[in-house]
Image (cartoon, rainbow, N blue to C red):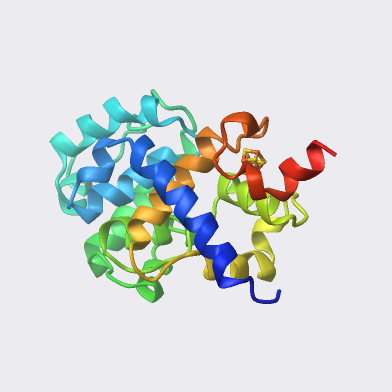
Amino acid sequence: MGNIEKKAILYFRNKVINWGKVNYVDYPWRLTDNIWHSIVAEIMLQRTKADQVIPVYKDFCEKYSSPQEFQNSLDFNENNIFSSLGLNWRNEILRSTTNYLVINGIPDNRIDFIKVPGIGDYVSSAVLSFHLGQRALLIDSNIVRLYCRYWGFEYNNESRRKRWLRELSDQLTPYKNVKQYNYSVLDFGMAICLPKPRCNSCPLKKKCSYFKNSIL
Ligand code: SF4
């Protein structure tokens, strides 16, 4: 895709960041400086609502401060960490992730992060940008929907895997304040640009392609 005008990028970014400043939610995994806990949180949050994850996450963090502690526990081989969250296949993922981290240590860069079993592009970007102060492109289904609607690109199940989407995300993601931008755009996609979008309360509507087409 071609380059978007700098002015248009800044408009989008500033609107999203300003919305995020007012609507930021300080979930416990956002406040931790324990990278192991932040990885566990991202695995717990996959396809699960944040409010459901909070008690399970807090309980886990109180018991296990490191992959080693978890690996040595009775919980490690019993499939009960995710029992209240459903999606029990995540027990196996967490075990594989834990085993790898015990042997190799916790990574501090993208190349090493994506070698960790159970950690894909999204989790590695989330941990790098939220907890390690590194610029990383955050791309999940809510963010893709927001980007495609606003900028007027095709949106379907395949959009997130397209090169142009990554290039768009790269242009929109700032080099400074990446943590703030990524939190804001993530929450914005979940709260405003929903599958049934809340356009009337959206600060982006003046310049949003989807909104402009919907009122024609
Ligand atoms: S105006 Fe509507 S479609 Fe456009 S970004 Fe806002 S919520 Fe999404």
Answer left or right for 170 relative to 18: right
Q: Is residue 169 visible?
A: no
Q: How many marks?
A: 0
Answer left or right for 95 relative to 191: left
Which residue is at a point 37% across and 33% down the rendered structure image?
79
Q: Is residue 144 visible?
A: yes
Q: Position of residue 6 (x, y in %)?
A: 55, 71
Which residue is at a point 56% across and 49% down the rendered structure image?
143
Q: Position of residue 128 (x, y in %)?
A: 34, 63
Q: Quadrant of the N terminus?
A: bottom right
105 relative to 40, above or below = below
Q: Quadrant of the C terminus?
A: top right
Q: Quadrant of ligand 1?
A: top right
Q: Position of residue 77 (x, y in %)?
A: 30, 39
In this orientation, which residue lies closer to the viewer: 147 or 51? 147
Q: Position of residue 148 (x, y in %)?
A: 68, 53
82 relative to 13, above or below = above
Which residue is at a point 80% across and 36% down the rendered structure image?
215
